[in-house]
């Protein structure tokens, strides 16, 4: 097994393990959020292995660095006392998680085996020049996919307005 | 392989074992000089104090031999994890900052940087965004009111300045057309004509030809002066040192998010802070002050000059030593600048801090981006291929 | 290709080992004489009367939302900035139109007083 494959399995294991831990094992809600960060960072590691470097950077910047911080603030807003979920609720969560995760995994496996993805080496070396780098992606984004970028701007505006309207009631 | 290990160990040792302890000493001595005190001079070996240089070593011994305390009711795991999450990002940030150019010795060619990755600047921002968790966790896990208040302040401050930190250097990406720090350093190893825009006029007035001879190093600080100011402010705010020390605010919050930390647990936060000072200096030097570049003396000039006298291998060696020395003198200068700022200015109020970020720096960095874009397009129209300013 | 990341991995390994090692040495070397009062959370000599785990101002939530939005915006700026020389005026137009809603959003927050502390 090459070192890259080893890294891939290590990141994959970390991602799945911390995702399951977030739902099922962890008692403190903040610890659960940190577990989510581990999942995000491991996914970024997998992206780097797939030569999608800009996506890896964005994965950490936006998901691990921004979204989870937002979660933490929401946790602080919600007045959650110590203790978090009881064992029963966590057990239930775990069952749900395994159920959903299992279904998705089996579904993916079925689709993948039908489409013949398994015969493809996930860590191919014969990628086009500049694949996944910011240069290729930037040029594609701002020429061919310009309209999509503009739409993202509008969606972001909607989220700002929504947040202000929801929070303003509490400020006033 | 061995080269990578050597390069990584070199930079890690220089930053953690040489710079970080020295900076704790500089901090004490400089504050003492600025406040007309004598400063650290008590730690001694056989009666010799070496200007107080023994204090960093004494600190480490003291911090290591303190009692390991975890406050009652704290989450023990997260309480121990927080200082690690603070220190590790600071330690690994220097991986992408080049401290020398590419040199060739016989068949081996190498670049003096631990990890020459394509998205070097984004790597720094990524590390900065992960550094937030150290302070949040410290505040949450300690279960103390002071820690909690400090943690919330720290998080809001760090995330706010993270956005503007990223946006303020977009102008630099545009000018150098890259996200790779080694490319940027090479691009800064030249000069540009300050009055290049005079080419607009068909003929210069008589006697103004000397204007064309005025050249400045092609450094980020000259191409993007506004970005330099904004970026330095933001990155210093990220480090939470005065005048941005709201999360620690000794006079209001005891010690902020690390109130409940003692011994080496506190020591790791302390270490992270001082290593970040070096990282900031390194990042600003690489982005704005030309990195390893010697002003007006490009790598070819030095190598060619020395090679004509002593041969090529020796020339490369000399060039490497000059570049590494030049880089670290810039780092020392920027560390000194940060110390000067830290001991000169009073702390912000929280509303001033947030206003500065969202109402001043954010609009200014957006303005800077679009002005740069306009300037560069104009320059392309006038003289295709000319360096934009 | 991936060898570029060797330095990062190595540094990460050393950094984790160093920090964990320092904590372990500290635990091993330090004296252990703890008692209840010493372990109580610091409250300037008083008994803590409120739990630190209580609700905090909605301001911080607003800052976090703003942060997420502008972080996503910044993420679009990075590849654009690095490829500006290639995309030129069309790219600039795209990013300018993209920024308009965000600037409007910023002005809206500002005028609504969401940025006042």
Image (cartoon, rainbow, N blue to C red):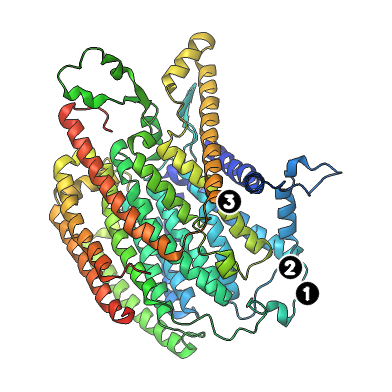
Disc 2 to disc 3, C-alpha distance? 23 Å
Discs 2, 1 touching: Cβ within 8 Å: yes
Residue that numbered label 3 is attached to: B274
Left or right, C5 with respect to C77, comes to: right
Establish whether labels 2 and 3 are both on one chain: yes
Q: Which mark identifies residue C33? A: 1
Classify residue A35 as left or right of residue B358.
Answer: right
Crowd around label 3: few <14 · some 14–19 · many ≥20 (10 Å): many
In terms of image quadrants, where is residue C33? bottom right
What's the mark number on residue C83? Answer: none
> How many numbered marks are there?
3
- Does B242 appear above or below A30? above
Between residue A14 and residue A34, name the one nearer to us: A34
The residue located at (65%, 58%) in the rendering is C21
Q: Nearer the viewer, residue B384 or A33?
A: B384
Q: Is residue C7 visible?
A: no
Q: Is residue B364 above or below residue B351?
A: above
- Is disc 2 placed on a helix, strand or loop? loop
Q: Which residue is drawn at 40% across and 27% down?
A: B189
* x and y percentages locating residue C31 in the rendered image: 78, 68
| Residue placed under numbered mark 2 in the picture | B67
Question: Callout 1: 10 Å neighbours few (<14), some, many (20+)?
Answer: few
Real-space CA distance between mark 1 and mark 3, rounded to the nearest whole angstrom: 31 Å
> Numbered disc 3: what chain?
B
């Amino acid at each position: 097994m090459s070192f890259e494959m080893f890294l891939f399995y290590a990141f994959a294991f970390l991602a799945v393990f911390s995702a399951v831990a977030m739902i099922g094992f962890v008692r403190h809600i903040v610890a659960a959020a940190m577990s989510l960060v581990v999942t995000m960072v491991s996914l970024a590691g997998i992206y780097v292995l797939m030569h999608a470097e800009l996506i890896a950077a964005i994965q950490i910047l936006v998901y691990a660095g921004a979204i989870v911080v937002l979660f933490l603030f929401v946790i602080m807003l919600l007045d959650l006392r110590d203790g978090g979920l009881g064992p029963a609720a966590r057990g239930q969560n775990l069952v749900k998680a395994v159920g959903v995760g299992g279904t998705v995994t089996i579904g993916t496996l079925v689709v993948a085996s039908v489409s013949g993805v398994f015969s493809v080496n996930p860590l191919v070396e014969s990628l086009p020049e500049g694949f996944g780098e910011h240069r290729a992606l930037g040029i594609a984004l701002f020429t061919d996919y310009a309209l999509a970028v503009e739409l993202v701007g509008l969606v972001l505006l909607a989220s700002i307005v929504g947040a202000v309207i929801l929070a303003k009631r509490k400020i006033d | 392989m061995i080269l990578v290990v050597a390069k990584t160990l070199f930079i890690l040792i220089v930053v953690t074992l040489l710079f970080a302890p020295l900076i704790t000493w500089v901090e004490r001595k400089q504050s003492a000089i600025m406040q007309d005190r004598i400063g650290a001079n008590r730690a001694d070996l056989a009666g010799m104090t070496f200007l107080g240089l023994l204090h960093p070593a004494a600190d480490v011994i003291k911090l290591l031999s303190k009692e390991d305390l975890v406050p009652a009711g704290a989450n023990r795991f997260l309480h121990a994890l927080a200082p690690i999450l603070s220190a590790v990002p600071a330690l690994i940030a220097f991986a992408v900052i080049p401290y020398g150019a590419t040199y060739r010795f016989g068949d081996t060619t190498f670049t003096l940087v631990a990890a020459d990755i394509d998205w070097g600047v984004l790597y720094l921002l990524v590390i900065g965004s992960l550094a937030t968790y150290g302070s949040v966790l410290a505040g949450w896990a300690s279960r103390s009111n002071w820690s909690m208040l400090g943690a919330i302040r720290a998080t809001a401050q760090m995330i706010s300045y993270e956005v503007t930190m990223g946006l303020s250097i977009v102008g630099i990406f545009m000018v150098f057309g890259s996200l790779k720090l080694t490319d940027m350093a090479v691009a800064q190893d030249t000069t540009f004509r300050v009055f290049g825009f005079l080419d607009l006029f068909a003929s210069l007035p008589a006697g103004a030809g000397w204007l064309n001879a005025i050249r400045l190093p092609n450094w980020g600080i000259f191409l993007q002066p506004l970005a330099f100011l904004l970026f330095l402010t933001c990155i210093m705010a990220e480090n939470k040192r005065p005048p941005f020390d709201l999360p620690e605010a000794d006079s209001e919050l005891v010690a902020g998010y690390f109130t409940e930390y003692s011994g080496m647990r506190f020591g790791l936060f302390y270490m992270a802070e001082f290593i970040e000072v070096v990282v900031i200096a390194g990042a600003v030097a690489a982005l704005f002050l030309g990195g390893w570049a010697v002003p007006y003396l490009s790598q070819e000039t030095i190598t060619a000059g020395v090679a004509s006298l002593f041969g090529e291998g020796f020339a490369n060696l000399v060039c490497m030593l000059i570049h590494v020395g030049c880089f670290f003198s810039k780092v020392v200068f920027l560390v000194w600048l940060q110390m000067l700022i830290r001991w000169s200015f009073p702390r912000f109020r929280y509303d001033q801090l947030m206003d500065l970020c969202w109402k001043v720096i954010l609009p200014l960095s957006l303005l800077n981006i679009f002005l740069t874009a306009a300037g560069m397009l104009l320059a392309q129209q006038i003289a295709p291929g000319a360096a934009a300013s | 290709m991936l060898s570029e990341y060797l330095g990062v991995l190595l540094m990460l390994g050393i950094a984790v080992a160093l920090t964990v090692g320092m904590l372990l040495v500290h635990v091993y070397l330090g004296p252990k004489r703890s008692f209840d009062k010493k372990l109580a959370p610091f409250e300037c000599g008083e008994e803590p009367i409120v739990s630190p785990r209580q609700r905090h101002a909605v301001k911080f939530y607003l800052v976090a939302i703003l942060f997420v939005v502008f972080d996503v915006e910044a993420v679009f700026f990075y590849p654009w900035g690095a490829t500006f020389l290639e995309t030129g005026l069309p790219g600039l137009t795209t990013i300018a139109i993209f920024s308009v809603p965000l600037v409007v959003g910023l002005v809206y927050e500002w005028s609504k007083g969401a940025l006042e502390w």
